[in-house]
């Protein structure tokens, strides 16, 4: 009986088809305005839409699932469901390449020291005034926070809000992903120490952004980030020399 195993060449062709179909699915999701929680068509309809065999379609969906763009809902009425585009998923994919390139945490931190002050400057320059009340609310939540969990949530929300107010979706996504990668490894920093100082700093940065003072907003954010890096360096000196690992 002839060996039915696929040759390396045919496997490469199959992978090529699945990659192309994955791109088509992403384009269709964007073109149709589908959002988190929306369900894609049943498998039989997708096979017809993309003119592809079941194996290649399933591999295409698996590619998107691995990258966090869809999730597979089990059971009757299940199937591929659009996921929320999350900076954590983007960061998880990024760490694969960072580890392969031998990027160290010190380099990641340097990138954050460039991007986040720039985001604060852009937020002060071009933010939508409708966001001011939301920024004030987040700062107040930080002032009122009790316990580590509430404080960390409020602090993360503050940085995320500033980055979103910069008005550049790519900077927002990239900066959040870098923050997610780093804080996952250094989550204990600032939980119990100098919390009052950080609260005041967040409030000052928010005031500068709301007032449209780009120079002050950038300067304050840079000083804030530099202090954070120094604190990490003292408490976790080994971290900065480590290579970012894929998680």
Image: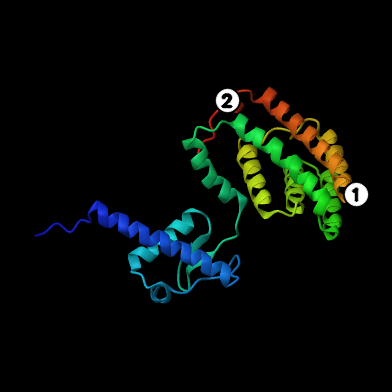
Percent coordinates x, y for residue 204 in the rendering: 88, 41
The correct choice, above or below, for 188 with respect to 44 in the image is above
Name the one closer to the observer, 86 or 125. Answer: 125
Query: In the displayed structure, would residue 75 be above or below residue 236?
Result: below
Asked whether the residues under the numbered discs 1 and 2 touch, taking CB atoms below 8 Å apart as contact, a structural biologist would say: no
Using the rendered image of the protein, determine whether residue 216 is visible from the camera's viewpoint: yes
**x, y percent for residue 217:** 84, 42
Q: Residue furthest left?
A: 1
Query: Is 208 placed above or below 23 here?
Result: above
In the rendering, which numbered label is found on residue 241? 2
The residue under the point 75% across, 30% down is 226
Residue highlighted by disc 1: 211
Where residue 34 sits, quadrant-wise, is bottom right
Q: Please provide percent x and percent y for residue 147.
A: 77, 41
Left/right of residue 150 with respect to residue 245 in the rendered view:
right
Q: In the figure, 175 relative to 67: above or below?
A: above
Q: Residue at x 57, y 73 (%)?
A: 32
């Amino acid at each position: 009986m002839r060996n039915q195993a696929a040759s390396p060449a045919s496997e490469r062709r199959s992978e090529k088809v699945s990659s192309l179909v994955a791109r088509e699915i992403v384009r269709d999701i964007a073109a149709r305005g589908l959002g988190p929680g929306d369900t894609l068509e049943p498998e039989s309809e997708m096979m017809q839409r993309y003119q592809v065999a079941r194996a290649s379609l399933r591999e295409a969906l698996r590619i998107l699932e691995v990258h966090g763009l869809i999730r597979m809902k089990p059971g009757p009425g299940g199937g591929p469901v659009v996921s929320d585009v999350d900076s954590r998923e983007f960061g998880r994919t990024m760490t694969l390449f960072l580890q392969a390139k031998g990027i160290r945490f010190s380099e990641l931190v340097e990138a954050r020291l460039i991007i986040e002050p720039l985001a604060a400057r852009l937020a002060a320059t071009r933010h939508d005034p409708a966001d001011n009340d939301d920024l004030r609310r987040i700062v107040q939540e930080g002032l009122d926070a009790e316990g580590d969990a509430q404080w960390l949530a409020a602090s993360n929300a503050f940085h995320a809000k500033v980055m979103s107010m910069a008005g550049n979706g790519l900077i927002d996504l990239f900066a959040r992903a870098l923050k997610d990668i780093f804080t996952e490894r250094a989550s204990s920093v600032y939980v119990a120490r100098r919390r009052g100082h950080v609260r005041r700093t967040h409030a000052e940065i928010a005031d500068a952004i709301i007032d449209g003072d780009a120079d002050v907003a950038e300067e304050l954010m840079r000083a804030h980030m530099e202090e954070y890096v120094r604190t990490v360096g003292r408490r976790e000196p080994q971290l900065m020399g480590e290579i970012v690992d894929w998680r």
